[in-house]
Structure formats: structure tokens, C-alpha cells
Amino acid sequence: MGDGLRLNMNGLDYLILALYFVTVLGVGFAARRAIRTSVDFFLSGRSLPAWVTGLAFVSANLGALEIIGMAANGAQYGAMTLHYYWIGAVPAMVFLGIVMMPFYYGSKVRSVPEYLRLRFNRPTHLLNAISFAVAQVLIAGVNLYALGLVMQALLGWPLWVAIVVGAFIVLAYITIGGLSGAIYNEVLQFFVILAGLIPITVIGLVKVGGVAGLMDAVRGSDLGAAGLHTWQGTGSTDNPLGAHWLGIVFGLGFVLSFGYWTTNFAEVQRALSARNMSAARRTPIIAAYPKLLIPLVTVIPGLVALVTVKGLGAESGDLVYNNAIPLLMRDLLPNGVLGVAVTGLLASFMAGMAANVSGFNTVVTYDIVQAYFKRDRSDEYYVRVGRIATVLGVLVGIGTAFIAAGFSNIMNYIQALFSLFNAPLFATFIIGMFWKRMSAVAGFWSLLLGTLAALFTYLGYKFFGWFHFNSDLEESFWGAGIAFATVAVVAAILTPLTRPKRDHELEGLVYGMANTRLADDSLAGDAAWYRSPVLLGVVAVILAALFYIPVF
Amino acid sequence: MSDPREPHHYDHESYDPLVEETEEERDRSAAARLFDIRRVIGGLFVAYGLIVGLIGLFDSPAQIDKAQGLRINLWAGLAMLIFGLIMLAWQWLSPNETPAPRHGEERP
């Protein structure tokens, strides 16, 4: 296998890829007609139906880091990777839709940091707005770098050409089409990604002799029978993931996953663009259904790669776990579906990056420029700022992509840093939403000290050797737990000592303080039983539990 | 950063002026002019279905062998074509209505 990862793309494969790029840009240009106000540009005029925002919600998370990474985890850890979907995502998505969305959408906030401004105060807001903006451009850069690497390996494009082409396309459709351009392309990307992954899965399963053949082969692999179980063996840490069930349930299932799904504006923004409260609440819940099934096309190919690609799992070179899907593409796909699969992979990179960039431009415009620098300008002015912020965000993203290129393992760092910001933010949110008395001052100090506590744990483990953990995973669980506890303790100490927010300031923002001015925005048909967020959400959680049975 | 305990000038309102202003701008919103994404998805998948399906019709034995004996291009092409047509049919059968004015929300 000395030929590396280069795919044998022919003219028709490139035609499929080119057709996709043209369509994506066309969507951006066509979406421009629908932009007149800043709400149009940043929140799609709050006009989209739930199935569109729901698919965009899942697509925003379906970046290639996710697809390539989860296939890699499938090859490395086996069935335990399913935890990232069924306990690490679905319950949090349902919770966001049922419990939290009424506060977000009902208060008409335009971003997640803005909720903090209304619920607490401006310092809390600014702290979160800045940390979010910085994290988004860093992650966009890592996405872009990963895109460049894959295009370089698969297509032989020079790294910088791949980075600039990818960045330019995302830049064009978001600058021109705003969030509508981003969301519409995410919906399209969702289907293209699936069209690329399904043939890999089908041919892979045929090759190993179906599901039964795959299970036999996995039992005979390095992973062994443990690779087919999710909960068995989690009474100790003697399992492929090295995780105890307590860690899985509370660390991954609660703190990390709730932190990511419920407070990450790059996700929540999709729901805020829905056309009414009912659609906003259904957005993450509709997204939970595809999320339940996505492991079929990521974890199964990972396992197929494990048993069919000899030597997979090397420390470096072409046979690292991360190349599980590209290797299967090379070995199994004939021209035609190969073009679709490459297009799907590139689509997923662009989906991930577009989510970061559109979250970034909104927060920079509404939460930094409008709130602290240029207060009373015309609405058109802010649309212009949004476009400039998009350009700057992408340019900085290109810069951080080249920085990322200088590190061997930056993705681990970014992931760790991101979970470091999410856990204290989630704790501050959840306490602030359910404890009406929590004061503004307590909000600020909770968030700040919680973040610092997580940072301290991380730096102490990674660089100074003050703490010892078995793995990065264990560190992120403990870091998140410590951050959560810090937020709770600081809030409990400071709140009684400081002035509470007045009741009318909290209307629609906290549990038990309904927004009396909230107009009924329901549309005909929203009352149908199959559109009930609670019913849809409960069914999703039950399905997630049932799916565990064959791989217990 | 200002003292967090300092009352803001909008303390007397339960609504935030920044949010309010933007919401008022929604009257001028052009979002209703957004085209229907189902048309784009349908169109792209019909095109992909035709291209990949045609490749599938003329696949060489080597290509079929690579795919473990499956005529994957033919099947994938057919599936994408049908999916594209369903999207187009869905859009044709239940077109997007322009959103009616929201209930209970007066417009100035």
C-alpha cells in the first residue's frame, strides 16, 4: 500500500464535485434576495420551518472532524463510540428543545451571550461573547486545516490551495447569503454527506459478510469481543474506552454533552432562526432523530476499516485511525460514487466551518460591536458590520489554520479548551435559569472562576504535572466536574450577599417567571400531536435507550 | 467593564432596547422572499442520480469488482434520482405559503 491515500478521481468525479460547489455558491447568491434587515442576515428573519432548522442543527455538528473522528473512534474503541451519540447527544438535544428553548426563543434574544446580558449583567455578557468569538475562529481554523489535509492527501492539491479554496467558498456564501445561505447549504450538505457515506457502509458490510460477519471479524480483531459492547465492563475502567459508567453518564452524558449542545451558540443559532416557538423547540428534537442513526454510517465503517485494512491504528503515516474512511473510499468505491463521497466529505468540512463563522459574525456584531462600541446605528449598518466580520473571521481562520499546521496534535488541545469553556457556561446557565434569586454579580464571578478552575485543572495536568489523570478523557471529565462545582459554590456564596435582579427584569428568562407579553405565534397545524415537542423528545430518548439493547 | 451593580438606564423596562429595535425591524424583513430549499436539493440529487446512474450502466467489470460485486453506481444513482424526485414532488404538492401575519402580534 505504498500509493498513499491518493484517490483515482476521474473527470466525472470532478464534475460531481464541481456541480456541488456551483450549487452551494448559487444558494448563497439566491439567499441574498431575502436579506433586508439584520434579523434576515443573522437569524434568517426568524422565518424557517422546523425541518430545515432541525437538519441544519444536526449538520452544523456534522463537520468532517466529527465524521472522520467518530469513524476513527469506532475503529479504536468499537461500539463504545455509540455513547457519543445516544447518551452524549440525544438527551441534551431533547433537553434543549423541551426545557431551555422557551427561555431562549421566548426572550427574543439574538444570541446565547445576549441571554447572559439580560439574565445577569454586561460583564458576564462581554466575558462570554469574547471567549465564544475566539473559540469559534480557532475551531474554524482547525476545521479548515483538516479540510486542507484531506484534500491534499486524497486529491493531491497543495495544502495552501485547498485551505484557500475551502475558505473562499464558505466566505462567499455566508457574506452574500447570511445565515439563510449557511442554513440552506447545511440542509443540502446533510443529504450530500449521507449520499457519500451510505455507499461506503453498504459495500463495506458486503465485503465483511454482513452484520454477522462484521461481528465475527471484530471478535477476532485486536479489539476483541469488548468492541461489541457499550456498557458491559464499565463497572471498572477495564474496557476499550477506559471509562467507568459513572464517568460516561455524568461526565459525558451530563456535563460535557449538555454544555456543548445547550449553550453552544453555533448550534443554538439554528433554532433561533425558526419561524415560531413551536418550530424552535422542535429544532433540536428533530435533529436528534438523524443523530440517533448517524453512527450507522460512521461507527460501522470504522469497524469495517478495523477488520479489513491491515495495520490500521499506526501511530503515524497513512494508517492512522483518522484515515479509516478515506482508506475505505480508496479501496471500495468505484468512480461515480467516489465523486459523491469526496463531495460529501468536503461538504461536511464546509458545514462545520460555516457554523463557526455564522455564529462568530452574529456575536461580534450584536454582542460586541452593537453592545459596546456603536450603539445607535441603523440596522443596515449592522448588516454591513456582519459582512465585514464574516470576512475577518474567515481570514483569521485561514491564519489559525496555518498555526494549526505547525502543531502535531492541536485538535486534542482545541477540544479540551472547548470543553473547558462549555462546562462552566452550562453550569452558570442552568443555575441561572432555575434559581431566580441568583444575582448578577454571582453570575459574573461564577462564570469567571468556573472557567479559571477548569483552566487550572487543565494546565496543572498538561503542563505542570500537579495533577495526575489516566487519560485526556479523564481529565476533561474531572475538569468539567470541578468547573461545575466551582460555579455552584461561588453562586451559592455570592448570591445572598448581593442584590437580586428585580422580578420584571427576569420575565421570560427564568423558570417560574412566564413572559406575560409573549404573543401566541403558533401557526395552523402546530397543535397536531406529531408536532408536540414533548412527545417527539420523549420518543427520541426512548429510542436511544432501545438502540443500546443489541450492543449492551 | 462597568460596575455590575450600577442600574442601567433600561432597568425600568422588562424588554431590552437592543433586542426590541431589532425585532421592530422585522416588519421590513425580506425573509419571505427566501426560495424553497427543496427545489435545490431535488435538482442536485436528480442531476447526481442521472450522472451516477449512467456511469453505473457502463461500469467495467473492474469497477464492479472493486465494489465487491455490487453495481453500486447503478443502485446509488437510482436511489439519488428517486430521492431528488420525491423532494421535487413534495415541494410541488405542498408549496411554501408566504407566512401569514402572526396571531396576536399587532403591527404598527
Image (tube, coloured by chain):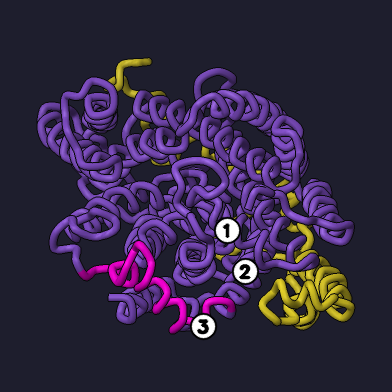
Q: Which of the two residues, A130 or A169, is positioned nearer the viewer here?
A: A169
The residue that mark 1 highlights is A325
Say what amino acid the circle numbered 3 marks: Gly
Q: Is residue A141 above or below residue A470?
A: above
The label number, if any, that marks residue A200 in the structure image:
2
Left/right of residue A372 with respect to residue A390 in the rendered view: left
Query: What hue represents chain A?
Result: purple
Residue A224 shows in this picture = yes
Q: State how far apart marks 2 and 3 are (Cα).
A: 13 Å
Residue positioned 50% across, 30% down in the render: A133
Q: Which of the two residues, A372 or A10, is positioned nearer the viewer here?
A: A10
Q: State how far apart marks 1 and 3 are (Cα).
A: 18 Å
Picture coordinates of residue A51, whole percent (x, y): 59, 68
Residue contact at pointers 2 and 3, CB within 8 angstroms: no
The label number, if any, that marks residue A210 in the structure image:
3
If you read the primary sequence from the N terminus, does the residue marked by circle 1 or circle 3 appear first?
Answer: 3
Residue positioned 50% across, 27% down in the render: A407
- The chain identifier of the residue carrying mark 1 reads A
Q: Residues within 10 Å of mark 3 (few under 14, many from 20)?
A: few
Q: Which of the two residues, A312 or A255, is positioned nearer the viewer here?
A: A312
Residue contact at pointers 1 and 2, CB within 8 angstroms: yes
Report the quarter where the C terminus of chain A lies: bottom left
Res. B80 image quadrant: bottom right
Q: Which residues are magenta?
A: A207-232
> Do tags 1 and 3 sit on the same chain?
yes
